Image: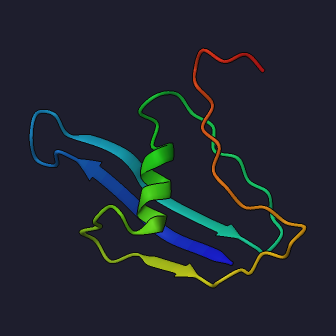
Amino acid sequence: MLKIEGLSKTFNQDTPLENRVIDALSLKVERKDFITLLGSNGAGKSTLLNLIAGTLYLKKSVLLTLKRIYATKNTATGICIKPSNMKM
């Protein structure tokens, strides 16, 4: 299970280039849920995944709970990024 409450991320805070890409996001993903992140360039999709992975720093205290989910031979977990010029 993944649970996030009140997640916000701002780049270049307190500068003329300030960009808040995630604002007070709350999310709960249960085991076997299938989710898709959709959004235009700069919408915060990769930022969200990097925050969950711990590769980006959070200044604020946020509830981020991640319980380990084990995959069996018949399940797959991954991230797929579709180039914007690819047709579906």
Residue depicted at x 51% and y 71%: 5
Residue depicted at x 84% and y 76%: 72
Above or below, 87 against 50 in this view is above
Residue 81 at what x, y percent from top left? 60, 38
- Most distant residue in the right direction: 74
Residue depicted at x 73% and y 16%: 87
Residue 54 at what x, y percent from top left? 39, 69
Q: How is the image coloured?
A: rainbow
Q: Nearer the viewer, residue 22 or 81?
A: 81
Q: Nearer the viewer, residue 18 or 45?
A: 45
- Most distant residue in the front direction: 73
Name the side, left or right, on which 46 lies relative to 3. left
Name the side, left or right, on which 39 lies relative to 29. left
**Image quadrant containing the C terminus:** top right
Q: Residue 57 appears in which quarter of the rendering?
A: bottom left
Name the side, left or right, on which 16 lies relative to 66. left
All told, the count of numbered labels is 0
**Image quadrant containing the N terminus:** bottom right
Residue 10 at what x, y percent from top left? 28, 50
- Most distant residue in the bottom direction: 67
Residue 73 at what x, y percent from top left? 86, 72
Residue depicted at x 46% and y 36%: 43
